[in-house]
């Protein structure tokens, strides 16, 4: 029966190893015994809301409709910042109102609720651990199929803290983006979408520049150009990547997340 | 039907990455297909029974009643040390008798069974891997709802190896505890409970001393005193923490787990 | 009802932290909502097919019959290398045809299917992420109980890329193997099976040599010889291990995976 189907709850935090993550999971399973828990990651750099927003943007849509994404990178825990439930694209999101959901709430007719305390909460809420005492109980309620109205009051999406990720800038001559993630293979993932680049280029040749290095070799998949070459490709999320197949572009170029990436036309070829 | 509800089995080890943890999980799922497995952590420092006891104390109670906590930090595996099942506060615990359960068995009318070999065990028990061959089958049996008597014989809790964690010491002038965990944000978590400190202080002002540094700024949550300040607060388990919000107290002070922490009165203020 | 029993899907990759692993999990749960997902590890060194083959050999057999092992260490993703489903010993295996399944397909009457594109696939397959777009949908289909024929065509097991792990060599005087894994405790796990060594030794004394060091102290479990001693034992998979109980053999000897290990007779004792 489909109504007996377990609801997926994902967890994305900067908590690392220790007591924090299993405490949140214990509360979720106590309040929603049929929830299926899936880790996105707990290795977001401490307080890095932009990294979390980026990871969530790319992974959240892979999950089953109705999945509840619990995301807690929350350096301002216990202060006046709002606590949120949001819904967009068939998914729920639960966490602090600090921009962490700024990317996933861009499309899909988003709705939002400001979490308010009520009888559904534990008797004592620790001001340093809303993940366990506030967000986990709200996420568990959604996993049980309860209505967001039970946990909060509707609030306008336009009043929420926006994503901290700067969108790429565009001129006639260049696109200016940045490295948003370095994966385990040293590939540099950028915030420059294939559609943005192709619309801008209009079929003309282009290259990418990061630091002092220009790259114009474009490939379809990693080994098309042979091991050890510095190449451009559109990767797993249709965004521009800079890679060294069987090598490590991040180490080769000395580049980390945050580094500017310029795409520019190749003139007089 | 509630009797069909899956039983949660948590795993806490010092096994790290590799074949050990998935082997234990494979055995658990083969013998108890409906068990829900949750990692506490597998990054306990090798052989650090005290760290494991501390982590278990704070996370075990968050889980649903009936949860089976499988904890294997077991440097003496295969020697004469006993193998245990214990029950306290509505939870089961399975692992070596080496003090790892010394904290969680302090309250809640604990009971214990010494695991004995029987027909429920695999035909060959590897002397270096009781986690897979002895503890996992016992935990799986409990997850299927079987009685601890099937796997062992009752033993007095008072005969078990005690917790290796020293309790704090108290004089009229000072409380002496220690840093028991450094979290990912560099916060120093101590073994000094709020109730212990407040009973001792009786409302008078106090400060904490760690190494050569005294801290007397007390806050409710991290950002109350502003980013970069060294502060005291009662954290997620109502124990004293030393923190640098948006910074890292462990790095600032050069302090790791095991460092003594002294709480003393502020005289002549 | 046994037919409603959830099917286990394990995941073994070199993806590390980030978006890749949770994306694969999201797809699996979307297409097979009752699958039970278990991580083997995602910390295989990038591109290390031999390490993955070794880990899979030791952990796969612990899982319930019918488990689907999804293993993606795939430096040639998107090129001409084949994509596989295989079956051996009651388990399914899904991943690239690059030797990663070379060890697990040695016994148990293996069968194999070459994955071919069909209507079961997503509309767009990213050439850099077959884990998400090709292997996860095939594994999800198997987890739903579908037949491998739905996803591919039978292919001869003898045509598959063999395991990259060299088998040990044997002369009258010595056995020559290697360190295949260093565990978290610094124990050196070799590819020398107890049965191979005992058949060769025929009851006569032997020692192991790694680098410039000879070891002849043989123990049953770690602490039999006391903390800090360099010892030989047959470990959790009945293979020769070199260990320093309460110490770290890898650091003591300066030895990593890949180092040759020689077993030789002790003459004139």
Image (spheres, coloured by chain):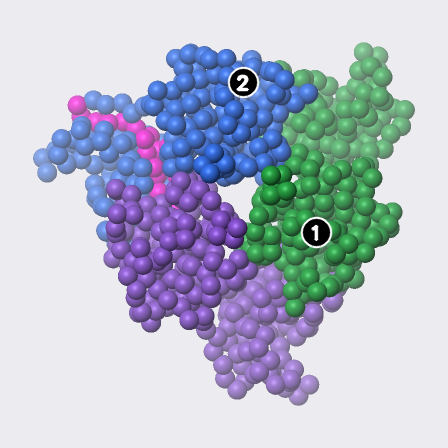
Chain colours: A green, B purple, C blue
Category of crowding for the residue at label 1, using alpha-carbon neighbours closer than 10 angstroms: few (below 14), some (14–19), many (at least 20): few
- Subunit that carries the residue with mark 1: A
Q: Nearer the viewer, residue B178 or A42?
A: A42
Q: Is residue A105 above or below residue B239?
A: above
Picture residue at 54% right of the left edge, 81% below the top: B174
First to last magenta residue range: C172-191
Picture residue at 73% right of the left edge, 23% below the top: A214
Residue on which the image places disc 2: C150
Q: Nearer the viewer, residue C45 or C134?
A: C134
Left or right of A193: which side holds B183?
A: left
Location of the C terminus of chain C by quadrant is top left
Give coordinates of residue A242: x percent, y percent: 68, 26
Decide if residue A40 is in sight here: no
The reply to the same-chain question for discs 1 and 2 is no
- Subunit that carries the residue with mark 2: C
Picture residue at 77% right of the left edge, 21% below the top: A207
Picture residue at 79% right of the left edge, 52% below the top: A113
Numbered label attached to residue A146? 1
Residue at mark 1 to residue at mark 2: CA–CA distance = 39 Å
Give coordinates of residue B225: x percent, y percent: 74, 67
Left or right of A257: which side holds A184?
A: left
Q: Which structural element holds mark 1?
A: loop
* Snapshot quadrant of residue A260: top right
Give coordinates of residue B250: x percent, y percent: 58, 60
Q: Nearer the viewer, residue B269 or A150?
A: A150
View extreme (left): residue: C268
Q: Is residue C16 above or below residue A34?
A: above
Q: Nearer the viewer, residue C91 or B201?
A: C91
Quick check: is C173 in the magenta stretch?
yes
Identify the main secondary structure in magenta: strand
């Amino acid at each position: 029966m489909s109504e007996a189907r377990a609801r997926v709850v994902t967890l994305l935090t900067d908590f690392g190893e220790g007591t924090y993550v299993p405490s949140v999971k214990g509360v979720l399973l106590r309040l929603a015994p049929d929830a299926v828990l899936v880790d996105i990651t707990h290795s977001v750099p401490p307080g890095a809301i932009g990294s979390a927003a980026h990871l969530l943007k790319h992974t959240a849509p892979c999950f089953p409709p109705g999945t509840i994404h619990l995301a807690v990178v929350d350096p301002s825990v216990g202060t006046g910042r709002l606590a949120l439930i949001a819904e967009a694209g068939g998914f729920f999101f639960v966490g602090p109102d600090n921009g962490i959901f700024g990317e996933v709430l861009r499309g899909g007719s988003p709705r939002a609720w400001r979490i308010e305390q009520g009888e559904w909460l534990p008797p004592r809420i620790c001001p340093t651990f809303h993940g366990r005492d506030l967000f986990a109980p709200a996420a568990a309620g959604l996993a049980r199929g309860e209505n967001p109205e039970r946990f909060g009051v509707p609030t306008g999406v336009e009043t929420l803290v926006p994503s901290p990720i700067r969108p790429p800038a565009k001129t006639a001559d260049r696109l200016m983006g940045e490295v948003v993630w370095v994966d385990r293979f040293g590939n540099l993932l950028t915030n420059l979408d294939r559609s943005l680049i192709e619309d801008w280029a209009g079929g003309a040749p282009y290259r990418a520049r990061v630091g002092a290095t220009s790259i114009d070799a474009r490939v379809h998949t990693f080994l098309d150009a042979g091991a050890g070459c510095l190449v451009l490709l559109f990767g797993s999320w249709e965004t521009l990547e800079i890679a060294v197949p069987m090598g490590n572009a991040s180490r080769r170029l000395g580049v980390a997340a945050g580094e500017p990436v310029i795409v520019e036309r190749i003139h007089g070829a």
